[in-house]
Amino acid sequence: MKKKGINFYLHIYFKILAQDIKSKMSYRADFIISTIGMIFTNIAGFVSFWILFRNFPSINGWSYYEMMFLYGFSLISITPVQCLFDNNWNLRMYVYSGDFIKYCFRPINLFFYYQSEIFDIKGLGQLAFGLATMVYAWTKIGLACTPLIILKTIIFLITASLIMIAVMNAAAATCFWITNSFFVMDLALKFRDYAKYPITIFSPVFRFIFTFIIPVAFIAYYPSLVILRPDNIPVLSWISPAFGCLFFWLSYKLWMHGATKYSGTGS
Amino acid sequence: MKLKKYFALTRCGILESLQFRASLLVMFAGNLVYLTVVYFLWKSIYASSGTNSVNGMTFHDTLIYLVLATALFNFMEMYAVWEIGRNIQTGKIVLDLLKPIKYRSYLFWSYSGSFVVNFFTTFLPTFITVCIVTNSAVPLGINLLYFALSIVPAVIINYSIDFIVGTICLYTESIWGINIMKQVIVMLFSGATIPIAFFPKTLKNIVNYLPFTSIYNTPLSILLNGNPQNANILTMLGIQVIWCIALLIVSSVFWKISLRQITVNGG
């Protein structure tokens, strides 16, 4: 079989995307309420952030606005997993009911086809919220605004987002073995809430755990050091894009391994 | 025997939640990670503030408060909105409405079994651990009795709010958005994520006029208060009881009105 190029996949992706949006639009009330719910979640998250840190000028050497930058950064970098990989949440249902077999018969990449089926528009509100927070913190800290630094920010944001995608992929893929992966996914989802804190607040043991075992520190902390503290960037920050790609690749392999092992329900 | 039918439901609930032991385990692991993050976060907050007591709460107070809030959440949260919403979407609600028992009581008593299980598997172990770890910083005296007393209206208030929100689902047929909105509002304004003592003054005043503080903040502040004044306790319990009665009436009237509205697909 001829290897299909990226253009082919992009073309397919937008075709599927259009169908998904059309079907979402037929449940308009639900769509509007869900969007409002998502905005509510972001506002509440910001309010708790504000209540917690407005009392203190700095936490562990991190100023209020630097913390806010971190918060905005983490919101943006968890947007892609919300928008593009939301179908992971349904995986256990498909596997349980046996409907998953329908994906195995398509002549395109299984993982790609499965994930492209759903695009969660709600996540765009979160993206806007995160961008606004980050830009506000950016101006308050007085960071420079050169093309180079913006390019760096974008690259580090994209690679940081791969981490959360990898975590959710791996969590969803557990359902190929244990069927009900909801609790694993719910647990994994909680990790994104911890990304907004600087890793230096933890003791060395937990710093190690949150860096290498549950890589939440790569979602916001290490990549944003490149922007926030340009004089003193640790090695881990520079290699965080590589880590993002590595974790994503590993989770993809795990997911595909589970999918190829999948034997259906027999019906 | 009137109560017999209710206790039969409780028994079923106990058996049902014991069936899902794996979920209990994952929940336990999730809480452990959450509490680790909370511990280090507040520790560095207190270290940076330079004083022992912030807003009248020491580090130990805050930690005990948040740990027990999490335990209380696991104990009280029933996900009733999900259940009602799912019953509406699948049409199962029709069968439940035909049962010779009020739907509201039916749902409550079916969940009561998981109260019992969660009390012994999460709340009690957490409470004992906290007592040991903090070197009995939790005062053990008459306040335990008051705490137990205030839990009863807290559970009923929490359930009534859930039920009111669940009733809204009859109109909207949207679950996720409504539920997430309810969840973030309750978690923030009840003081489950940040103690109410840390709220800025105006926000504190607003929150005091809302029913949410009665769910988590009131029982926990009663528990943490070593030598309670009778008048003080009585006002707190009184407010809880008033909210409890008010919400019971609202939820039952709202349900009765909405039931005429119900449309079930297929059924």
Image (tube, coloured by chain):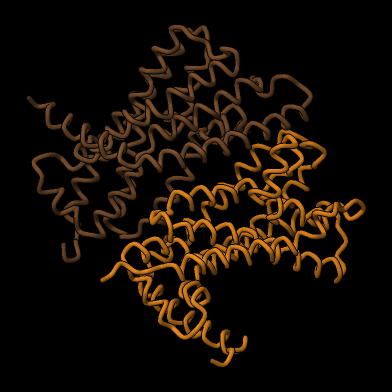
Chain colours: A orange, B brown
In this rendering, position of residue A60 left or right of residue B70: right
Q: Quadrant of the N terminus of chain B?
A: top left
Q: Is residue B87 above or below residue B209?
A: below
Residue at (78% x, 48% y) in the render: A66
Q: Position of residue A53 (x, y in %)?
A: 70, 38
Q: In which quarter of the image is residue A133?
A: bottom right
Left or right: where A158 falls relative to A112: right
Judged from this view, the residue extending furthest toward the right is: A231
Where is A3 relative to A157, above or below? below
Give the total number of marks visible in the rendering: 0
Residue shown at 44%/34% (left/top)? Answer: B73
Q: In this view, does B141 lie to the left or right of A8?
A: left
Q: Where is residue A199 in the image (x, y as percent from the top left)?
A: 73, 43
Residue at image position (26%, 60%) is B89
Q: What residue sits 53% from the left and 92% below the top?
A: A1
* Residue toward you, A125 or A203: A203
